[in-house]
Every structure is written in C-alpha cells, then in structure tokens.
Amino acid sequence: MYSQTPNPYIFLYLLTGISGPGIKEVYLPPEPPDEQVHFKKENKFVRPEPPKHIKKAIKVLYAKSNKYSTYYDPDYVSPYAEEIKEWEDQQWERFENGFWFWNRGKKTYLTPFYYWYLTEWVPYFGKPDYRETDKEITYWLLYMEEDPFCYGGLLNTIRRYGKSAIMAAWMIWRTTRNFAHYAGAQGESDDKIEAFWKTHVLKPFRKLNGYVTPVYDTTSKQTADISFERPVARGKEGRIDPDIDDEDFIDGDSETEDLESYIDWRDSNESAYDQAVLHTYLMEEPGKTIRTSVNDRWTTVKPCLRRGKFIRGKALLATTVEHMNVLDRGGKAYQKLFYESDFDKRNALGQTDSGLYTAFLPGDCAYEGFYDDYGHPMREEARRSLLIERESKRKNPKDHAKIIRQYPLKVSEIFWVSSEGCVFNATILQKRKLFLDSNTVPLYSKFKVEWKNKKRFTELVFSHDENGWFKCGWMFPGDAWVKLANKVKRNSDGSFSPLNEAIFTAGLDPVDHRVAIQAVSGSGEDQITTTRRSKPVMRIKRRYDPHVDVITKEESLAGFGDEGAPGYMTQELLEHRRDNEYQYKTGITIGMIDDRHHDANVNFERELMICWLFGMPVMIESAKPGAINYFIANKCQDFLKQKYVPEAVNKPEYQGDGTPANSMIINEYTDALGTHIEYFGHCEIFSEFNDDYLQFNPAKTKEFDYAVGSGFTELGERVRPKKVELPPMDLLDIMPSFRNGQIVRR
C-alpha cells in the first residue's frame, strides 16, 4: 500500500486530509489475469465457507489435538484430514497474499487482514458483510503499517459503524501473526474498556477456528489479558515431554515453539503504559474520554511504540466526539490531537506533529441500512435520512449539536459545538471556529516585551519567544514602529499619558482569586467536573480607521463610493463586508494577554507595559482594583479608562477609574460584543475568544474570562478620554487679521 506499484488506488469515500488532499493514492498488488479473479458469476463478494461436515471436522480435530483440552486424543486422525488441509492451505494463502474478486464488474482487492476479518472473525453482531468503506479503511491501515514515518492513525466516523469490531480484530490479527508481539488497549474509562475487551476482543477470539488460533495460556479466564504461551505445567506434568527431541528446543519448530506474544487492557490513567514495550496499541473513544487527557496519554504511549529513531509499533484510535465543554478533556482535548495529525503538515522528521494520520468516513458513507448488494454506500439516501433526523432536533440546539457530532457529514462537523443559549451570531462563530481549529499554526506570534536597557518608563522593546507572555497578530510592521510604538507623554507633575487613544484600546478582566472556573460534563457515573483558575485576560484592539480600511474596487463597483475613498461605516457597508468576509485591518483584535503569573505584581506590570507600548488606555473592571491601584501608584493613572456610565456618556466631567461589572454594565458590553461579532467576528484571530463567545452566558459571567475582557474592550471605545490632547495651533489660524504685530484692516 505504501510502496509504489503500477496499480494505484484513489480513495472514493475515506477522507485522509485536513488542510490538503491527504493520502493521494495507495498502491495495490498488480491485477491478476481474469481467470484468477474469484466470483465472476456472482459479481460480488460471497463469504467462502467449507461444507458443514468439514466445519464440524475442523472443530473436532483441534479439540482432540489440543493437549490442554478435555477432549485431547494423541492418536486421533480425522477422516477428513485431506479436505481440512486443502481448506486451511487455501485460507492461509489468502491470509498471506490477499484476495481478488469481481465486484460489480470491477476487479477488487482485499488485504490479508480484511479477508481474515470477513471469513474468520465473528463480532457480536454476527459475521460482517463486505463493505467498500471497510475495504478503504483496511487499505488505510495497511498503508500506515508500512509507512516508516507513521505511528498509526485516528479514525473518525459515525456511531454504530463497527469501529470497535475492526479495532479489536486488527489487534488480534497483528498479535497472533508475530512472535514476541505486545499489544495494549485503553478506553474512555475503566469500565468501558473492560466492556470493550469482553465484547469485542475476548468473545470473537474464542470463536476463532483452531488453525488461526495460536497456543495460549488457558489456565486463566483472560479477563484482562491473553498470553500466547503454553500453560505452566505443575508436578509430573511439568517434566520435559519425552516425545520432544533436542532439536525441537534448538530449532524451535512450529509444533513446540510458542509465540510469546501478549495482549492486555489497562486502566484509563494517562501513565498506565508508561515505559511499556508496545507493538500494537488501541485507544477506544478518545473523543469522549473525560477522566484523563488523551493528549497526555498519547505523550506517554508514543515512546512505547518506538525504539530509538525506529517506529516499531502502530496505534489505532477510533472515536466519535462528545463533551466539547470540558476543559482540556473529552472532545476538546481530542480536537488538538486531531489537528496535529494532519497528513499534509510535516515536521523536520517527516512526521506529523503527533506522528499519527487522520481519516474520516462521512456519515452518508457509513450509515447502516444504506449499502447496496455490492457493499457500496447509497450516499444520497443516507444523507437524506440523516438530515431529516437533524431537522427533528433543530429546536433543541444542544441535541442538534450532539446529533451532528455523532453523525458528521464533513470534517467541520466532527467538533460541532452547541450554540444553545448563544446570545451572538452562532453561524459566524461556528464558521470561524472551524477556520481557527483547522489552523495548527496560529494566526499570531508570541513575544517577550521588556524595558529597553532595563530602565522603566523609557522605551519598550520586544522579541519573538515561543514561551512569550504576549500574543499578537499585528506587532508594528514596517514603519509603524517609528510612528506608533511607545507614544507616551511625560507630564509636568511626573505622571504619564498615552497618545494613541484614538488608534488603540484595551479591556481587562482581572484575576478573581475566589473563582475556580468549572466545567461539568456527562451524567451519573460518567459525570466529571474539571476546574481551572481565573485568568487575567486583556484584549488589545486596533480601533476602526476608515482611512486604512478604504473602499475597495469591488465595493466601488457595488456603489459604495470611489475606490480608495475613506470607508466610513454605514449599515449597508458593514453588512456588505460581513457577507463578503472582508478582511479588516482595523476594528479588530490584534493582541492578548492571558498568562497568569504567581506574582500579581508581575501581571500588573505586564498590563502596564502593553498599554505603554501601544500608547493606549485600558478599561478595567473596578471590583478587583489591584491593577487600577498599580497604575496609579506608578503615575500612569491616565492609562486608565474612566468609568463607563451609559446615561452620562456625553457628560464631560470625570466619572472615576474603572467600571463595575453590574447587571447594567453586563448588558451594555453584551450588546457591544454582539455588534462587534456580527460585523467583525469573521476576522477573530484567537480561538479562546471565539469559543468563549459561543458559550457565553450573561447570567454567569465568572466562567468567561475571555468574553468579559473583550466586553470591557468594547465599552472602552465608548468612554470619553480623560484628557483631550489638542495639536499645537498657529496664532494666525486663530487671529487671521493679525499680521506682524499690526491689525490688518479689510
């Protein structure tokens, strides 16, 4: 599949790319002559099975040949030995080379694993039917196994497709065909992985025919593991078998040598396989795991699949997605792993960031009941059925989002978030979420900002730093550094005033030490609550400037004025730019601080530094006055926006520093945010703000540091400056009739 052959295959249903096309093609063995291709008459796959009497004879033969069976008979010779051998030889040849058959007039290839799965493995739902989609999944699996740069893959598709059956079969297939092969599995919780083991691994394994079942230890009940070694004999039975000669021990022939392979499952803890050796690893439902972080778990498992620089093992993670509201767990954590597994984005080692590859089988290719007689999905009919089901849930946004995630039709729906209760334009936010989530490289950089030569209140400089505390998407490009950076005035009383209030503004939601932000997901035994500390979120915005965002050629043709003319805001222009997703240069978020230092004064100093760097004031919630007091103590009180009072917004008198977060203010900044998102939301560069907007509840603002900080930024634009700096004026502009000390008479 990985190495090039003259017989390429392009996936018809399975999507293997996120940012690009993914795996463009896989390579099949050369097509055999027509006469060597099976099922010409049937023109579809028909499960090969031996006659009933041979089926029974096989069971009898292996029961009587097993020294550890109660039916053991060392002298037994089957009367059907020749027919059994013929059947077994046929099967094993196909297990080695795969299988070709005619399907709807086309030569079709089954991998050795898929043929084994169809003919030997019996999951809980009975013998599996042939499906073209399963064929493509097994092509993808074999491609990953052969790719030396790949640690395995993430398989995403709908509920009840049969992912678990394929996963379990793949693990048994790999383990029973290799010596000293170690396989492990973990799930979303301990009880779920135990149920997976019993239903999908153990029961089908015990149904396998004797000729595909290696010797394994039958002295245990295999409740947590399967050891492919002979049972340890005791007493007289522990003596060396006199029928085994010395050469058997030296050469290790097939009748005396054990595989010495091993399979087990372990608890859901992220460190359960720490320092283990693994050749095959399964992670069941990582997109629903809320008791631990699947990212941390993968960080533990990944080295277990490697020996030095060589990848010796492969992993398979299959899931649908739930619990998108849990911090760093569930679908939200899995989402990070998903986008780090983009086939078209590689690091210097030639690997994806996670080492894994993603694959997605759309819901209309995977819906049970919508396959034709040849195993092809009936996409149109399946899609229609799924959309009808969605429509029935539309009035309940939470259930609607859940059914979209459970039966996604496209990649963007895998992580669909409920817009239940969203007070903003959820369509804009959902679309932006998809864009931001799919960009593994953020739209901003991280910076370290410090005083030049360590001298405070002089000039600030910055440098790129992967661990920097300031995130910014616009950091004074070109000559903007000279024109706009560090524009601060020293007043006669020793205080300082910002000079760029008309260009930049900021809002800050300070740390609340009393608050631990919680997210609850699941119910009953599956319910889990995760917490994080409150964060000091400061949003920096470049205020809208019609002389920068001028009328474009397209807007001019649409009747909005001359090309290059100032883009003065009108309702019509705002709506036109929203509908066409105009990429604003101003009126948008350009930077953010959300790093929380243990020392509150370090947080305050950073906030002051950013205000100084941009020459702007900041609107701060006054109920937590630590930052306000710090600014005042450092003679930077003019960097504080005065209190927002809606009914007094046009009054010139000073209203006080900071703004309280009372009900009226919350309503005011919620309205302001709604306007900003409606017309500028398609330009948001930070997923943290976008995600907070989607979940924001004005009645529970303590849970939404980002939305609140953003709301105070919007309010800050509405507040009058404390001081209005007037440009110097020529006396002649004031007294045009005065020239050279003389009054000019007209």
Image (cartoon, rainbow, N blue to C red):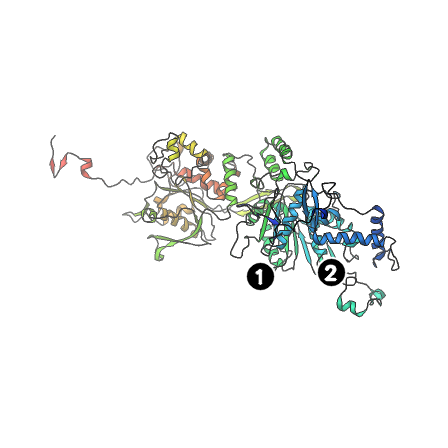
Please state which of residues 183 and 109 is positioned toward the viewer in this rendering.
109
Residue at the image position 63 percent from the left and 59 percent from the top: 312
Which numbered marker is on residue 309? 1
Q: Residues within 10 Å of mark 2 (few under 14, many from 20)?
A: many
Asked where in the image residue 177 lies, by quadrant, the reply is bottom right
The amino acid marked with disc number 2 is: Leu
Q: Is residue 538 left or right of residue 75?
A: left
Please state which of residues 119 and 563 is positioned toward the viewer in this rendering.
119
Please state which of residues 272 and 118 is positioned toward the viewer in this rendering.
118
The CA span between labels 2 and 1 is 26 Å
Which numbered marker is on residue 259? 2
The amino acid marked with disc number 1 is: Lys
Asked where in the image residue 280 lies, by quadrant, the reply is bottom right
Residue 735: percent from left, percent from top: 17, 35
Please state which of residues 31 and 626 is positioned toward the viewer in this rendering.
31
> Mark 2 vs mark 1: which is more N-terminal?
2
Residue 724: percent from left, percent from top: 30, 39
